[in-house]
Amino acid sequence: MIKKLLIANRGEIACRIIRTAKRLGIATVAVYSEADRDALHVDMADEAVAIGPAAAAQSYLVMDKIIAAAKETGADAIHPATDPVGERAFAKALKEAGILFVGPNPKAIEAMGDKIESKKLAAKAKVSTVPGHLGVIKDAKEATKIADEIGYPVMIKASAGGGGKGMRIAYSQKEVAEGFTSSQSEAKSSFGDDRVFIEKYIEEPRHIEIQVLGDKHGNVIHLGERECSIQRRNQKVIEEAPSPFIDAKTREAMGAEAVALAKAVHYDSAGTVEFIVDKDRNFYFLEMNTRLQVEHPVTELVTGLDLVEQMLKVASGEKLAIKQKDVKLTGSAIESRIYAEDPVRNFMPSTGRLVRFRPPELGTVDGVTTRLDTGVEEGGEISVYYDPMIAKLVTHAPKRLDAIKQMGRALDSFAIDGFRHNIPFLAVIMRNSRWRDGKISTKFIAEEFPDGFHPPVPEGKVRDALVAVAGSIDHLSNKRRRLITQQMHGEPVRFCEVRLVELGEELIRVSVEGRDYPMTVTLGGEGTGEKVRHIEVNSSWWFGEPVWEGTIGGEQSAVQVRPILNGVMLTSRGVEAAARVLTEREGELMALMPVKEKPDTSKLLLCPMPGLVVSLAVEVGQEVAAGDTLCVVEAMKMENVLKAERDGKVSKILAEPGDSLNVDAVILEFE
Ligand code: ADP
Ligand code: ADP
Ligand code: MG
């Protein structure tokens, strides 16, 4: 067995591997860049080696530095986590250095690393592949000819592609010509390989993949499927196991094909065979990922297996201890990827200090499990250098809907502050009826949020719930003020009854514990006329706690509470509302206050996210037309091209290449 393991990666995946290694009594070595000196994976490992500057290309992706770190610490094995340095070259170099690679053999990686080659192999192993042209396409002319033969729509793909890059859908000859050229240049710049191929675009597709596990003795089993259809721009956001769409017969057929393909390449580790499934449950091989995937926890929760443990064991030469018939799928698991991005601003990456990072309660209660895989902790920093995924929240319950409900609750009580994140977006999806019914496809996000994400306005029961919480917090606040000693440990109110009287627009009279006092609660949204309702609120929340937990009208709820001027900002189920509890007189006076007008930014180009100015495409005095490129800003490994929204003339330039800008910094002004 392995004695000392080096983890050649960072973040949540590195932390997750360290956790299993520790449990198995294996010593661990972390590697870290200058930016990660205080990162969680460094804290968790027994030893840590600095491997250079923040940029991954100069640290985590430099094979020689990682091998040197292993030699220096005497590590006898390296786990690549996800694909840090080109997996194949890495596996080969380690073999030469006499260090064990915790992953498949280099030949299997090579065979599966290329989409064209792996599809050819799959076809040979009698695995159904997406109809298409299994060859490299020379030019746009050949591309349109092939697309005509396949039939529209088609998908143009980079053979070396990954992470949703270099892919284009085309519905016509014209789109094929355009898509071919842009896919080719994106493939060249992202992967240094411009080979492009074309296949049929499967409509209303679902992404369903099979987890396989092999050993060095020729045994391969599968651990069922994961559905990853909730994607944004071909990137997974929410995954689940099992798929609500797959029956036992289809599962068996897909599993058998995945195992056949794995056996064809003598696969000897954990791997994933991805399929695209059409509405009639026909499935087609997409590609194989020869590593531990981000979404592996859902498989672990339904099978009860630890995939990292299995990888470490088979890498050391052990035979698989589990047979296919021993694999039992129990319950349903959901994973949400928590990204440092602003869902409201078109999911732009966001950076900053983790001022607050308080995960929900983890563990198993009444057969329902909540798990968190993360690589960050409170006080840490989200930098521009790495992937914006900061954590994965995973739930498991006997029934799918219960796992979804638990995910909703866990997201509501996950307090993160200091930068923007996608929890409100995920919380809204958890309440989406199409998602709850499992009627999804890879177009789900595009169809349900056609013009981006707009946080839902507080209305109906959510609004009442937030009003009730605001009222009860105000009540506590008065009570605290009345405490003669002013001490925090005075008797907090454990129960209070809030009676709401809506008086149109935004005037709501609340009575707390039988004592009536009129007040206005600014919650936004529209009033619904005169109504009287009773909402019972029960909580032991006290000032300073970021999450209000308790029952509202008998229902278990979590509401995030952040103090703001004269009130609290309340968040629940993706709804955010500023709540101010005022007496009637205060309300009257408040109505007289001038409303702060939003500054006119129509003549400014603002930096949409914190980032680095790469280049400016215009000069002072230059006339620009709508759509012209103005500036390129780099953030989180992505170049963002800022274009002119309308015609105009540049009057001032306030930034220059190399500048590091904050969000909303003015880059240039128009006349
Ligand atoms: P990557 O290497 O970027 O993961 P994949 O080939 O696995 O590329 O495709 C990523 C996603 O793109 C899939 O999950 C699916 O949503 C979509 N996709 C890929 N190929 C097709 C296709 N032929 N028809 C429809 N959707 C596809
Ligand atoms: P869960 O989150 O447990 O899945 P549901 O989505 O089934 O709950 O919703 C139960 C009902 O409670 C819904 O009708 C919903 O509108 C209402 N509700 C919404 N927000 C809240 C809240 N913060 N507290 C209590 N009930 C709420
Ligand atoms: Mg893929």
Image (spheres, grey):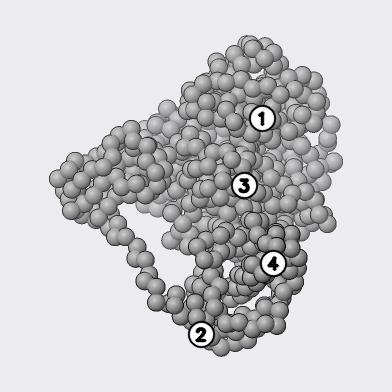
The residue positioned 45% from the left and 30% from the top of the image is 191
Label number found at residue 483: 4
- The CA distance from mark 3 to mark 1 is 17 Å
Q: Categorize mark 1 by other alpha carbons within 10 Å: few (<14), some (14-19), many (20+).
A: few
Say what secondary structure mark 4 lies in: loop
- The CA distance from mark 2 to mark 3 is 38 Å
Q: Work out whether 460 lies above or below 6.
A: below
Which quadrant of the figure has residue 469?
bottom right
Q: Work out whether 75 lies above or below 560.
A: above
Say what secondary structure mark 2 lies in: loop
Which residue in the protein does label 3 denote?
357
**What kind of residue is marked 1?**
Asp
Q: Earlier in the sequence, mark 2 or mark 1?
A: 1
Label number found at residue 504: 2
The residue positioned 78% from the left and 44% from the top of the image is 303
Q: Categorize mark 2 by other alpha carbons within 10 Å: few (<14), some (14-19), many (20+).
A: few
